[in-house]
Image (cartoon, helix red, strand yellow):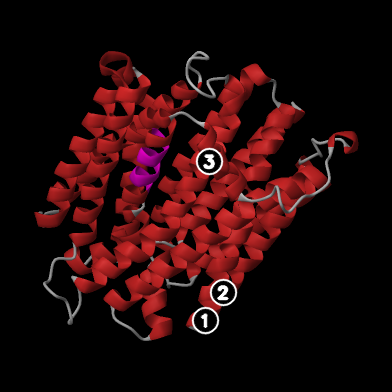
């Protein structure tokens, strides 16, 4: 019973974090435009840098928070991160100026780096044969959070652009109280290790790339490029929808919730069946086709029905990342004929993959915001606000090209 309560608390940690991330997406454009007294194209540039700062803080602090939990235990680190998360969103909701909002979003990246401690807690309390199911529960929390957060943010945003920030703060602080009474420490003192700053950084994970086969380097590269393509939606969709469709915060939130529904359906229902029938390569190609066709619909359709149909159809891109990751994992599990082909390298491999993904999340938002600003607003080169989506689809094609080049090496 205690383990079940703990897992549900950790589910709530991830869920609240994703709701807190998603709940502000529909209203962030209006708040930036209000605080900075700027048009939507300039606000998108600011939002791009905010997102990059958020990702950079997670890139730096996720390994540090994980190592701190190894030193001081999981419970105090998780509760401290949640408390900081709640206070930080309260500050953002009450921000009197754009500078305060920038500071708040940067600190949110630090407090939101609690995943490393949460996943370490799961490993502490779950037998190895059941960890996959427990980690799957966390994945489900990601999906639900991205469905609930934007929809709730769009609804609350109709009251005012600050209200979703205050709601996110309240959710986090309630979660702290829940955890204070439910969460027990999972790491006994005899299993703790000294904190080492030299070991607590993402670059140590990236160094593992040099020890992998050429196939792994190709597939990790493909995953990184794909994540760079995928980050366009949380980076620019709200601004694109305002400029291209004239949507309100509620409409934007509803559309983002539809993105979450499409993703959940594909990854929860279709993924296993599709891969079993046509394999990882076929699944990736289906996903890429969906990206290209949906991008065309977003760029040229003006009917809400067509846009929503494209959003749901675009959920098929959810076939891409798991298939890429499966191939990547299999590459290091091959027999000793391939360099580094042992199961013990899986942890290093996943750490390196996540580090590459963080770099993509740092680079992507400013890139797409810059492109959006160049093709939107009164000073646009040409009015085509869908250009970031077209760029993203092009990058997705490049990612799949790297994938296809790597798979030939995996099967040699």
Which residue position is annotated with label 2?
103
- How many other residues sit within 10 Å of disc 2, few (<14), some (14-19) or many (≥20)? some
- How many other residues sit within 10 Å of disc 3, few (<14), some (14-19) or many (≥20)? many
Q: Tell me which segment is drawn in magenta.
A: 219-227
Q: Secondary structure at mark 3?
A: helix
Q: Is residue 270 visible?
A: no
Q: Is residue 330 left or right of residue 308?
A: right
Which residue position is annotated with label 3?
352
Q: Is residue 226 magenta?
A: yes
- How many other residues sit within 10 Å of disc 1, few (<14), some (14-19) or many (≥20)? few
Q: Residue furthest right?
A: 190
Which residue position is annotated with label 1?
99
Q: Position of residue 101 (x, y in %)?
A: 52, 75
Q: Is residue 99 magenta?
A: no
Q: How far is mark 2 from mark 3, CA to CA?
A: 28 Å
Do residues under tags 2 and 3 come within 8 Å of each other at their CB atoms? no
Quadrant location of the C terminus? top left
Mark 2 vs mark 3, foreground winner is 3
Q: Residue at x 35, y 46 (%)?
A: 225
Q: Residue at x 18, y 61 (%)?
A: 387
Q: Which mark is first along the chain, 3 or 2?
A: 2
Q: Secondary structure at mark 2?
A: helix
Q: Is residue 144 left or right of residue 174?
A: left
- What predominant SS class does the magenta segment belong to? helix
């Amino acid at each position: 019973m205690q383990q079940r309560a703990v897992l549900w608390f950790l589910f709530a940690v991830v869920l609240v974090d994703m709701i807190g991330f998603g709940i502000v997406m529909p209203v962030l454009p209006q708040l930036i435009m209000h605080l900075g007294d700027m048009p939507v194209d300039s606000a998108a540039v600011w939002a791009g840098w905010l997102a990059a700062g958020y990702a950079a803080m997670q890139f730096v602090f996720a390994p540090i928070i994980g190592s701190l939990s190894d030193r001081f235990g999981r419970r105090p680190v998780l509760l401290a991160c949640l408390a900081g998360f709640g206070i930080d969103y309260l500050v953002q909701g009450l921000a009197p100026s754009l500078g305060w909002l920038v500071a708040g979003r940067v600190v949110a990246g630090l407090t939101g780096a609690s995943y490393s401690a949460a996943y370490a807690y799961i490993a502490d309390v779950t037998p190895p044969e059941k960890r996959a199911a427990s980690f799957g529960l966390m994945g489900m929390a990601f999906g639900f959070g991205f469905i609930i957060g934007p929809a709730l943010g769009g609804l609350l945003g109709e009251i005012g652009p600050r209200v979703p920030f205050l709601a996110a703060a309240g959710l986090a602080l309630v979660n702290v109280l829940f955890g204070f009474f439910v969460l027990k420490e999972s790491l006994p003192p005899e299993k703790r290790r000294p904190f080492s700053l030299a070991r607590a950084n993402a670059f140590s994970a990236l160094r593992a790339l040099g020890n992998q086969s050429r196939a792994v380097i190709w597939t990790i590269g493909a995953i990184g490029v794909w994540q760079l393509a995928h980050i366009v939606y949380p980076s620019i969709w709200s601004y694109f929808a305002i400029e291209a469709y004239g949507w309100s915060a509620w409409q934007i939130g509803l559309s983002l919730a539809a993105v979450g529904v499409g993703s959940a359906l594909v990854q929860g229902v279709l993924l296993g069946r599709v891969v079993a029938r046509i394999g990882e390569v076929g699944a990736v190609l289906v996903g890429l086709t969906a990206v290209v066709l949906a991008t065309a619909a977003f760029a040229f359709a003006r009917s809400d029905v067509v846009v929503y149909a494209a959003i749901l159809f675009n959920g098929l891109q959810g076939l891409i990342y798991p298939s890429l990751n499966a191939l990547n994992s299999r590459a290091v599990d091959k027999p000793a004929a391939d360099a580094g082909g042992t199961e013990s390298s899986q942890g290093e491999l996943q750490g390196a993959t996540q580090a590459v993904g963080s770099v993509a999340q740092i680079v992507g938002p400013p890139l797409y915001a810059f492109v959006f600003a160049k093709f939107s607003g009164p000073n646009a080169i040409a009015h085509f606000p869908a250009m970031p989506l077209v760029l993203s689809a092009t990058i997705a094609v490049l990612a799949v090209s790297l994938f296809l080049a790597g798979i030939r090496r995996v099967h040699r």
